Amino acid sequence: MTLFKNLEMPFDANSICILVLTLPLLVSLISPLKRTNKFFFYAAAISVSILNVALLLYIGHSANPCRISQLFVFSFERFSWIFCILVNACWALALLYSSSYLRYRFEEKAETFHRYLAASVSLVLGAGLAANFFTLIFFYILSIPVIYPLITIRANRESQKAGAIYLLSTLLPSLLIICPVVLLFFPLAAPFSTYTIQSLGYGTGTASLLLGLMVVGFSKNCVAPFHMWLPISAVAPAPVSALVHSVGAVQTSTIALLKITTSVYGTKYLASLSNHFLLTGWITYLCGFTALYTAYRAWTAPDLKQRFSFSTVGQLSYIITAILLGTKQTTIGATLHIVTHSLAKMNLFFCAGIFASIFGTTNAAEVAL
């Protein structure tokens, strides 16, 4: 499907895929221009995000895989397509916000900020468009250390601690859980659309165990026990927190689970697993516990950024629960929740940054006075 059926496309899907992935890297390369010509830099950066959205609208969504090489396979299937449009839209909003925010906060590190921010966007887009396990794991893992300098950009003791916890909570589960599961049980290079968990010969017990390990192993989704890195990372500046809590990190895991559950498992088979507690049903209870616990923590947290962070953890659990239920309606609901939550939470962190600039604090009681 394409939104411009009557137009002759000058590029094929592979070319557009490469452009969408690499254009944000150009912003990383031109980040030194921020020191000499701020207007040109922000105009160019925002233009790149708008151009990416235009390219995505131009190509439309299609399940046909784009094979860049034997190992790197991408697809503009509907979930990837919506997610990548959302990523670019949120990036454009973060750029607009940071153009004013950086005048008053860590202006001397603005070049570093934009370099890593653009690079992380490129890697997140790669994970979002991934159509096989190799591509997904490659971009997912590579995005983890790129986000680290954004969390620690203040270079104080608190941010360094947050960065260390972030790395331990996201990188170790990826290397110790996701990589072994994928290497041992799934074909690396085959597109998701070419096989199912049943065609691989696994029974319900093995299929459920593998899914449970992936839900926990893709720990950017913040399901317990790997959920505390997100509230702790709220020490990062508002533009960083806004993008990380919307699409820059957390939603990378949810889009990965959407791909795996809808393509490899299939909604009908997934729904049958979720009906039994000892199969996949226990994961929904784990998500429910995470949501309830973080709702309480958000309610009692005096700091607005901490409150928003715990809220994000709970919202991610709602999204994962909807995905695991495995019906068409809950899958659509999860996709819409990803979009609405990302935009809403980004604006909440923007508000927290404004409060910090005006009042010098994000403490709810002091801001309300």
Image: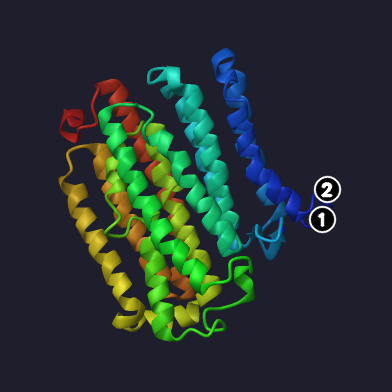
Q: Amino acid at mark 2?
A: Pro
Way the structure is coloured:
rainbow
* Whole-percent x, y for residue 48 in the image: 64, 35
Q: Residue at x 62, y 62 (%)?
A: 77
Q: Disc 1 on helix, strand or loop?
A: loop
* Visible residue check, residue 218: no
Q: 197 above or below 161?
A: below
Position of 84 compared to 241: left or right?
A: right
* Whole-percent x, y for residue 309 in the image: 29, 45
Q: Which mark is residue 10?
A: 2
From this viewpoint, which residue is outermost toward the top?
Answer: 36
Distance Cα–Cα, label 2 vs label 1: 13 Å
Q: Amino acid at mark 1?
A: Asn
Position of 337 compared to 163: left or right?
A: right
**Residue beneath disc 1:** 6
* Whole-percent x, y for residue 330 in the image: 43, 70
Q: Residue at x 38, y 18 (%)?
A: 104
Corner quadrant of residue 235: top left
